[in-house]
Amino acid sequence: KQARLAEDAGQFLREVLVGSHLEDTLPNDLMAALDGCNAASDFLRQLGQSEAMLAKYKACVQFVEPGSGPRKQRAVLPTADRRAPNLLRRRIREVQCMEKLGRVDSESVYVTELRCQHSVQH
């Protein structure tokens, strides 16, 4: 892939904000899972439907706590043993349950620390 050169700060900012940076960075299975997603909750739904992806990836799921006061970030199952099997599946199910109960707005959900469960040769 060819490098993109920015002639000025405006061009640089445009490239950072709207440039296409993911094609060569993310694995194909993640790109496919992201296709058609409008929010992180859509992406989590896609992940939760794929046994292969649940076995391959681990991630934290977080949300911004609703309320009128200062909004705080909260993790889904934050104290769970990070080595526990099916942790991503449990986090996805928990946040979906919280959404159904109205305890979490699906627009406030986000994914952090998404990575492979096991090291991969590049």
Image (tube, rainbow, N blue to C red):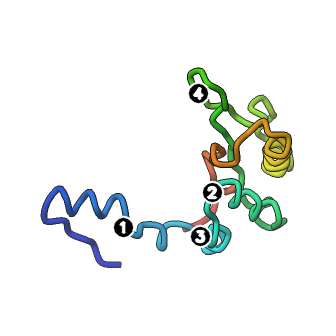
Kind of residue at badge 4: Arg
Q: Nearer the viewer, residue 46 or 71?
A: 71
Q: Which residue is mark 1?
A: 19
Q: Earlier in the sequence, mark 1 or mark 4?
A: 1
Kind of residue at badge 1: Gly
* Picture coordinates of residue 46, whole percent (x, y): 75, 65
| Element marked by disc 4 | loop
| Element marked by disc 1 | loop
Q: Are marks 1 and 3 in contact (CB under 8 Å)?
A: no
Q: Earlier in the sequence, mark 1 or mark 3?
A: 1
| CA distance for labels 1 and 4 | 30 Å
Taking 69 as reference, is 87 above or below it? below
Numbered marks: total: 4
Q: Earlier in the sequence, mark 3 or mark 4?
A: 3
Taking 23 as reference, is 76 above or below it? above
Q: Earlier in the sequence, mark 1 or mark 2?
A: 1
Q: Are marks 1 and 2 in contact (CB under 8 Å)?
A: no
Q: Which residue is mark 3?
A: 27
Kind of residue at badge 3: Pro
Front of the two marks 2 and 3: 2
Q: Nearer the viewer, residue 108 or 51?
A: 108
Front of the two marks 1 and 2: 2
Q: Which residue is mark 4?
A: 71
Give the residue displayed 67% in from the left and 57% down from the top. Answer: 116
| CA distance for labels 2 and 4 | 19 Å
Q: Which residue is mark 2?
A: 39
